[in-house]
Amino acid sequence: MIVTLYGRPGCHLCEAAREALLRVQASAPFELDEIDIETDDELHKRYLERIPVITLDGEHLFDYEVDEQALLQRIVYREGR
């Protein structure tokens, strides 16, 4: 299971989202993939006004902030616990 965080350096909301993801990861392991939208023009255009953007296995979950409880429930559900 891969959680992707789309953000950019210097983004305080992105850092808060990363910290939230790490808290969830401590309870329900997943791979965390962090993507800097500044390195890709298409991603920059798509996500600049919405970062941080969080996806789970490619499925869009959150913009701006992470709902830790909702993410944990999604991960547990997918794991079939």
Image (cartoon, rainbow, N blue to C red):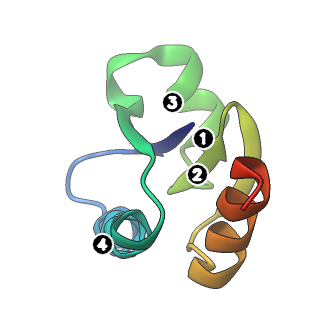
Q: Quadrant of residue 63?
A: bottom right
Front residue of 49/20: it is: 20
Three-letter amino acid code at disc 3?
His
Three-letter amino acid code at disc 2?
Val
Q: Residue 19, which numbered label?
A: 4
- The residue indicated by pointer 1 is 47
Q: Secondary structure at mark 2?
A: strand
Q: How far is the residue under mark 3 from the one under mark 1?
A: 6 Å
Nearer to us of marks 4 and 1 is 4
Three-letter amino acid code at disc 1?
Tyr
Check contact, mark 2 vs mark 3: CB within 8 A: no
- Which residue ends up furthest to the front in the rendered image? 81
Which comes sooner in the sequence, label 2 or label 1? 1
Quadrant in the picture for the C terminus: bottom right
Nearer to us of marks 2 and 4 is 4
Image coordinates of residue 57 in percent, x first then y, are: 66, 33
Left/right of residue 9 with respect to residue 40 in the rendered view: left
Which comes sooner in the sequence, label 4 or label 3? 4
- The residue indicated by pointer 2 is 53
Image coordinates of residue 80 in percent, x first then y, are: 77, 53
Give the class, few, some or many, for how many residues have Cα within 10 Å of label 4's Cα (few <14, many ≥20): few
Front residue of 9/16: it is: 16
Which comes sooner in the sequence, label 4 or label 1? 4
Check contact, mark 3 vs mark 1: CB within 8 A: yes
Q: How far is the residue under mark 2 from the one under mark 1?
A: 7 Å
Check contact, mark 2 vs mark 1: CB within 8 A: yes
